[in-house]
Amino acid sequence: MTTKSHILSACVTFLVLLSCSLAFLPKSKILLENNEYTGILIAIDENVREDAALIENLKDIFIDASGALYRATQQRAFFKKITILLPNTWSSNLASGTATTEMFAAANIIVTKHGNVGRETPYTNQFGSCGEEAEYIHLTDKFILDKQWTTYKYGEPEKVIVHEWGHLRWGLFDEYATNDNEHFYLNEKGQVEQTGCSRFILGKEYDSRTGEQCSLNSKNRVLPDQHCRFYPQLENNQATGSYMHMSFLSSVVEFCHSDVTGDPLSLHNAMAPNQQNIQCSYRSAWDVMLESEDFKNDNNPVRQVTDTTPTFRVVKSAPLRIVLVLDVSGSMNDNNRISILNQGTRKYIRATVPDGNSVGIVSFSSSATITSYLKELKTLQDREDLASLLPTTASGGTCIGCGLRSGIEVLENGGNNARGGIILLITDGQESSSYPRIIDMKPTLIGKGVGVDTVAFGTLADEKLQSLSDDTGGLSFLHGEGESSTGLNDALTATINARIWGSSNVPFELHSEKREIPAAGNLIGSIIIDSTIGRHTKFFFLWSTSLISVVLRRPEGTAIDASAPEYKSDDGAKTVSIEISGIAEPGIWLYELTGSQQQVETLVKSVARYNTQPIVVSTTTSKSLVTELPAMTNIYVQVKMGYSPVFKANVTATVERPSTYQAVDVRLLDNGAGVDVNKDDGVYSGVFMDFVTATCPDCRYNIKVTAEETSWGAEVPVAGNSNSRVLPIMRPTDPIDERINLTQLIGRFKRVVSGGVIQAPLTIPPGDHFPPSRITDLRVIGTSYDDQTVTLEWTAPGNDLDRGTADEYDLRYSKNFSVLYKTFVNGTELTNSNLTAGNLSSPQPFGETETVIVQIPDQDENATLFFSVRARDAAGNVGQPSNIVSITVELGRYPDDVVTTTEFPSRMSSVLSSAVPQEGLPSRAVSTSLVVGCSLAGVAVVAVLITSLIIIKYKSSKKRKIHNLDAD
């Protein structure tokens, strides 16, 4: 992003980063059995205006999409069962029933309100690697309702769905150019080709600014400038692939494949510089699909089906039904756990659960006791009455299964169905041998459709909690009991936020911190509140040993103290709370705590103002339960403002490790390198691999994420998004959106949020088991005729994936593209002796930019040279080869008409007779092209040989001119 719009900076001085920790609730489980997809959940956002036509149009689109998918998968898959979830504000007569396990946060496809100009394009929220399922498909109500607009903009809507399904289900990537300098490339013959799949798409090239046809000669070995675009022939085209490229073409009916005996019109183009080739190491879309569980080992073989129409079930959202199942065994007296449990759950009932939802309470030790059946929270008195029933004492054994069984009983009380209910289990110990146990209750919970969220209280909690949450579709957390741990309260907020994601009533936590009042008896802190939030703002100060006093100052200086009516002190819960009436003022709020030396936990929660788009942070990991070696998990943090990505934030995950091991900081980057797939998409990624090497069958690792403004300021795009999205129809007459590079500054923010828990029940052997990460952004950034060099640049990988510093680089080239991507080691190795700048033996730390200047190898004329690089570490681990870039060597050019090699002797005398000596003119030229990752705009060079000196150079000099294709 090079152009900034300071639209927000004038009106938002400070912007708090709102967070819903671990907002990625497990998605509705989609199954493919007997060629039929079931379990698909489509959810409509609460801000979408009620319209029965939206439901009917959704059905029509997915009926057509089912048939298109069946053909695209070569008769191996189609949609069979789809559920549509309506907001609870819509009329009940539009639904056939009430939702149970269906929640907006678990939807595979979401439909939101249109209105953000430039952001109507359907896309998939995708941040995993090639072949990994994505999070959800995003559509707008305009896309669903306005078929005329949709068809003009994107083509048939059912084909858009198939394109996005490729992202969602099989982890495919787009096959069109996603950067300005990737629209064309040079093939092995030095010919210009448009970036796409397949090569058989008919069309012409036009300047995107003027609409005039580009000056393009596929044989001149020079790429057009960066404004030139390929526009397909919309009617009577011939290419049958690919859905991941131009799905709007009527001729496109399948995905690209690599079978040379198959349909040639959808044969995969491995050389095209698109994301499918970069991220999937040149594999075709169909090859990646065949490796998925859907089709692997000949799963779901070809089946003849005459009717691919799916069935639809329309349900209406229902309030949450939550049962707190709380451990009150004797060990809960240790480390003041029972008091901390009471504090946390009181806050949860009083302020975290939104109005209209129901909560029940079960306590368990050697047996279980139902303290309260489900009670709907509608008034403050409802909350106080329920909070007064929370346990305050502990004794006895630990029958976790007893608590789970009683939790089901609460959900089924009065003849209700337990399905869709949530059990929030908080425990600190290993379960006793009494019946029932977790293993006994798990099948019942799964069969009844009850999700179990678990909070492990301390390091000795039962190791089966993680799998209990995973298997029932719940979330898992850890309260680590460290001096600074706020895990319990973070978890209690997250379990709500994860399930009402998308709601205007999400109770964001703005601040979560534990600090010690010093011996002097005074502690000062600050919290930032921005103008997009402020409803139902409440400050909590949880003390541990003796009563404290609080003075809270508004941004304009007015103090709120014990004399104010909004100031509440609860000695029993050891809590001081201050609720701000109306809308909390934006700015910096200061607090001062006075009391004896002790730990105090400070929590602040607030709800977004109406008609605003607050910034939301959501976190997840690629593996929450690590059971295989080498042990690792990717940490992803998504920072968004509404549905727009936030760029240039500083994001760090601090992982608390077991016992006496120190915490580890993992820097998360949105740079498109390492495990981060897309640059500037608001997803910050990194790898955690520092598991303890001791035997640790129940080790848990707590994640805390810090996200804050960088010194250069965080931004959001004015228009568009950088997610995986369908390509709109390309017409030379359609203007290019010039706002695509405009951004808005956000302002100051800082937040620390929970990222959940990782469990690794295995022994980690010592040693270096990880190679450097794969380089995916190798690019040509400059050339020099005088020095006969090409400058290559890439982002440095780490020593171990994304961490540390690699030991050396292995840089190779070949005249054959397939050599480098099929058998990298067969390429010719380049060493430091081939460089005029840079050092292959001294890499920089991960994330830094590497630059080397390579002397062009001596090759035959009319040769295209391909380059690729990989990294090694000191232990001998080798990363995967990078993407591939190229330069093309060509003969020089002469005045008037080109003189070929055979023509030159007969023309020599006539040329010499009028020659004026010129130094430094080329005998041959070199064009550069980034084959995968970046294509650079070319500068055509015509070399005129008009002196005997040049004739001598033609015969003996090795100099060739290199077209700096990035110059334009």
Image (cartoon, grey):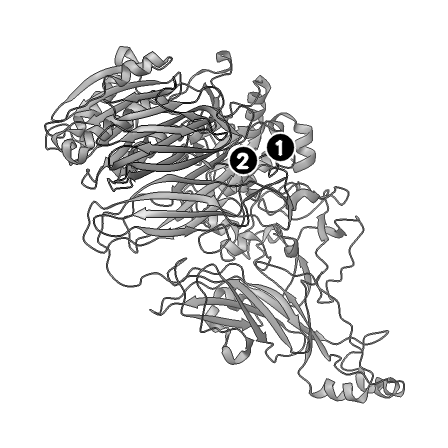
Pick the residue in front: 297 or 922.
922
| Position in image of residue 466 (x %, y %) | 26, 38
- The residue at the point 57 percent across, 21 percent down is 56
| In the image: residue 67, left or right of residue 549 | right
Secondary structure found at label 1: loop
The residue where tag 1 is placed is 116
Q: Residue 420 — which label?
A: none
| Position in image of residue 669 (x %, y %) | 46, 51
Hey, what amino acid is under mark 1? Asn
Secondary structure found at label 2: loop
| Position in image of residue 449 (x %, y %) | 31, 25
| In the image: residue 948, left or right of residue 11 | right
| Position in image of residue 89 (x %, y %) | 49, 16
Question: How far apart, in angstroms, are the residues tagged by discs 1 and 2?
Answer: 10 Å
Find the residue positioned furthest to the front. Answer: 520
Q: Earlier in the sequence, mark 1 or mark 2?
A: 1
Quadrant where the C terminus is found in the figure: bottom right
Q: Residues within 10 Å of mark 1 (few under 14, many from 20)?
A: few
| In the image: residue 912, left or right of residue 966 | right
The correct choice, above or below, for 69 with respect to 375 in the image is below
The correct choice, above or below, for 729 with respect to 772 in the image is above
Q: Is residue 441 visible?
A: no
Q: Are marks 1 and 2 in contact (CB under 8 Å)?
A: yes
Q: Quadrant of residue 924?
A: bottom right
The residue where tag 2 is placed is 643
The correct choice, above or below, for 372 with respect to 886 in the image is above
Pick the residue in front: 824 or 306.
824
Q: Quadrant of residue 400?
A: top left
Hey, what amino acid is under mark 2? Tyr
Q: Is residue 148 visible?
A: yes
| In the image: residue 417, left or right of residue 87 | left
Q: Residues within 10 Å of mark 2 (few under 14, many from 20)?
A: some
